[in-house]
Amino acid sequence: MTLSIIINHYRKPHLLRLCLQYLEKNLGDLQKETEIIVADGGALNDTAYMMRTEFPGVTYIPFVVNVGFSKLVNAGIDRAQGKYVFVLNADIILPKSGLIEQLITYMEQNPDIGMIEPQLRNFNGSVQQTYFDYYTPMTTIYRRLPILGKTVGRRDLRRFLMRNADTTKPLEVFWLMGSAFLMRTADVRAIGKMDDRFFMYFEDVDICRRFKLHSKRIIYYPLVSLYHYHQRASNANSIFGMLMNPYTWIHLESAWKYFQKYHFQSTIKMRK
């Protein structure tokens, strides 16, 4: 089998339905060599019924509680039989056929790539930024508090956001947002699955860093575009807003775990 598509889902069955419908429509010839796995956190009876009646060919893994992004993805990886795994949020739309094949072909041509992610667009056509340079502890604060990011943190954020990068062609980056990324199953077995100490946020930073520690490149691939219904739940425009937003605290907790794990070393030395 060529491909295992792992969809992580949490209580948005209307978006999951669209995601699966577009996959069925646009997988094309790849469909014969693809399995689809849905890992569902905090599973609802309505979602289970939808999966059973509308998508009986999809492997469905329900969890009674919300176990977090990493555990959902890992449950899918444990069941995956494909040479490649393509991890998707349930709010991703594959707009036409042939796109996943382009990603696979590029990885086949470049065996030193560990992870590749297509360009993601909003439904109005604007491009989302899903590629980044490395985090420092202060980058986390600058990102959460725009008033600091626009003043003392401006230079650090320009580096982090890769403002000088050419994003019209494949771009090597430090990490990719975990919304739609392709990996070789063998590589995942070698470096380890998602670190489930991260309930939400920084699990994507962490796995990209581990790929780089194994001398594998992380590639943003803007020549393929998917659509993504994306909402940044941890955004805050003021100190009060940051303190009152529970997702901000989850983000900061995950950042602390990440920096502790790597002894507060922001970037890495590549293996020879």
Image (tube, rainbow, N blue to C red):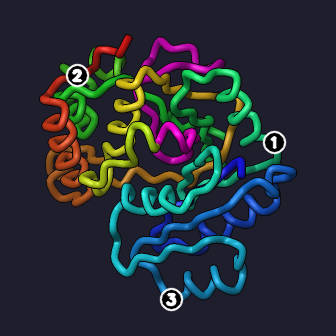
- Distance (Cα) linking label 1 and label 2: 41 Å
Q: Is residue 179 magenta?
A: yes
> Mark 2 or mark 3: which comes first in sequence?
3
Identity of the amino acid at label 2?
Gly
- In the foreground, 80 or 196: 80
Instruction: Write down the residue under mark 2.
Output: 153
Please tell me whether mark 2 sits on a helix, a strand or a loop: loop
User: Residue 34 vs residue 41: left or right?
Assistant: right
Q: Residue at x 75, y 34 (%)?
A: 102
Does the image show residue 161? no
Q: Is residue 195 magenta?
A: no
- Distance (Cα) linking label 2 and label 3: 46 Å
**Counting other residues with Cα less than 10 Å from the Cα at mark 3, is it few (<14), some (14-19), or many (20 or more)?**
few
Tell whether label 2 touches label 1 (CB within 8 Å): no
User: Residue 73 vs residue 144: left or right?
Assistant: right
Instruction: Name the spot of residue 66 as percent of width and height, x first.
Output: 34, 71
Please tell me in which quadrant of the rendered image residue 239 appears: top left
Please tell me whether mark 3 sits on a helix, a strand or a loop: helix
Q: Is the C terminus in the top left, top right, bottom left or bottom right quadrant?
A: top left
- In the foreground, 40 or 119: 40
Q: Which residues are magenta?
A: 162-188
Identity of the amino acid at label 3?
Asn
Q: Residue at x 27, y 20 (%)?
A: 267
> Mark 1 or mark 3: which comes first in sequence?
3
Does the image show residue 263? yes
Nearest to the eye among marks 2 and 3: give it: 3
**Which label sits on residue 45?**
3
Instruction: Write down the residue under mark 1.
Output: 98
